[in-house]
Image (spheres, rainbow, N blue to C red):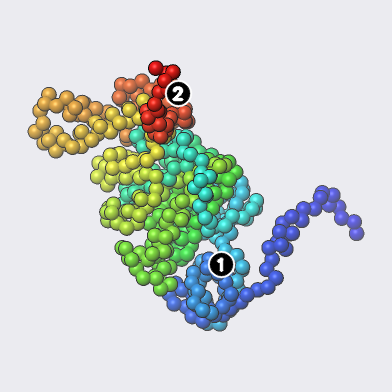
Amino acid sequence: MKSSYTREFNFTKYLEKVCDAETILYTGRVSGVKGLEIESEGPRSVIGEICTIKLPDGKTIKAEVVGLDGIKVRLTAFGETKGIEVGCEVIASGATLQVPVGMSLLGRTIDATGEAIDGLGEISPETYYPAIEVSPDPMRKAPVNKRITTGVRAIDSLLTVGKGQRIGIFAGSGVGKSTLLSMIARNTDADINVIGLIGERGREVLDFIDRDLGKEGLKRSVVVVATGDKPAICRVRAAYVCTAIAEYFRDQGKDVVLMMDNVTRFAKAQQEIGLSNGELPGNGGYPPSVFDMLPKLMERTGTNEKGSITAFYNVLVDSDDMNEPITDAVRGILDGHIVLSRQLAQAYHYPAIDVLASISRLSKRVSGKITQTAAGKIRTWMATYRDNSTMITAGIYQKGNSASIDEAIDKHDEIEDFLKQEEFDPCPMKETLDKMAALTGMEIPEEEYSESPALNRPTTAQIVDAQKKVPEPEDF
């Protein structure tokens, strides 16, 4: 019988399946389950390899190899360990976790293994990226010399962020970290958002997608979810999966914004895995593997020769202590920190950014000279008012005693209005610079409104070399 199908057959995906098929299976047997850890005798495997555990009822569970001891293999399951018994077959895949990537990911929500959880059908990947990868060669990283727009006035004016910069948002619980991230996701001028919701409450997932991100924001975003009730390995791997997805889009020449909420829960998940695997607790009760993983994860973002990943990492500060171990470690790794103040939040000052406690290490590289001067002027007024606030509010200070304090008092209300911003109120870069110019009385030149106002500015080394240069005799 002749087929009525006249189009060409595409066997590519079938050939890929055949090429990837493992012709020799290495297997083992479960020998015990201790808390989060599954022990098995065999299979032959490597750290990070994905294995499949076959349950008596025919179901399967994915697990990852987290430890090796002779013929004993220690695994952590990507799901509930319910139903696992001694003797269950363990089959090695021969591969570490691979993330399906492609433009079809845009607008989708996936889990820590890269599978869709939004009910919109399977994802058709263009290729696969490894979840665990080394960071780009530092000698091949493109310089950070372009400004990114976040749409948040306090950040774009006084804490300017460059494309490819990595910055942390530090705050205790309930101060507005997630709300600030949602403002950036909606208003940024980046091409693509990759958002990791790690260890969050289940209620907050749809809240963030529907209420904070919205349909327009979701169209250019990928959301990776591992809620707080998921196994520790899911919460850890979700951070790697969203980083791998961001790397794919960067390799396509895109400017990507990676937002991870939050790093502290990632660290606590690795703490659970490390301690159950026999690691000794160290600083703050965290095993050494936590402090080994943080820089390896965060150094993968930034620039390469094709595109950029600008990363915003939310950090939940335990007990509002900015010197607790995870906060201190992350602050030392990143290129800046934005500190949210509970005192400002209680005074209904949103976003509750404590500008004077925050810093962007690369702001001077991506801001014009006059813009920097205007930002410095505002910070000086804020610092003067803060240092003398007790005298001012108590009525001890008498106007006329200090010109700088008088000026700080006169500008205080204007600065407060400038820094406050409703979450639904976007502020383009032009509007931000216009408002800053009006506040400081300084005229910001047109060329400083561009994306790279400091691109042709000489470096510090060039300025110093020029000053050291000795004139030739014919120059006299």
Question: Which quarter of the rendered picture does the C terminus lie within?
Answer: top left
**Residue drawn where x is 34% and y is 34% of the image:** 158
Q: CA distance from mark 2 to mark 1?
A: 52 Å
Which quarter shows the N terminus?
bottom right
Image position of 170 (left or right of 121): left
Q: Is 336 located above or below residue 402 in the figure?
A: below
Q: Position of residue 336 (x, y in %)?
A: 37, 44
Q: Is residue 32 visible?
A: yes
Q: Circle 2: is it few (<14), some (14-19), or many (20+) Cα within 10 Å?
A: few
Query: Please, what secondary structure does the residue beneath circle 2 have?
Result: helix
User: On the image, numbered disc 2 is attached to which residue?
Assistant: 447
Q: Residue at x 37, y 28 (%)?
A: 467
Depth check: 274 or 145 in front? 145
Place of residue 327 in the rendered image (x, y in percent of width and height, measured from the top left): 33, 53
Figure label count = 2
- Of labels 2 and 1, earlier in sequence is 1
Are there few (<14), some (14-19), or many (20+) residues within 10 Å of tag 1? some
Q: Identify the residue at horizontal 43%, vertical 45% (top origin).
A: 166
Say if 458 sits above or below 279 in the image: above
Rendering coords of residue 17 (x, y %):
70, 61
Quarter of image, res 28: bottom right
Identify the amino acid type marked 2: Glu
Q: Looking at the picture, how far across and down is residue 31, in whole percent?
A: 51, 81
In this view, the residue in front, 56 or 14, is: 14
Q: Is residue 155 visible?
A: no
Relative placement, left or right, of 377 versus 86 is: left
**Residue 49 shows which numbered tag?**
1
Secondary structure of the residue carrying numbered label 1: strand
Q: At 35% from the left edge and 24% from the top edge, which residue is drawn? A: 437
User: Which amino acid type corresponds to the residue marked 1 in the rendered image?
Assistant: Glu
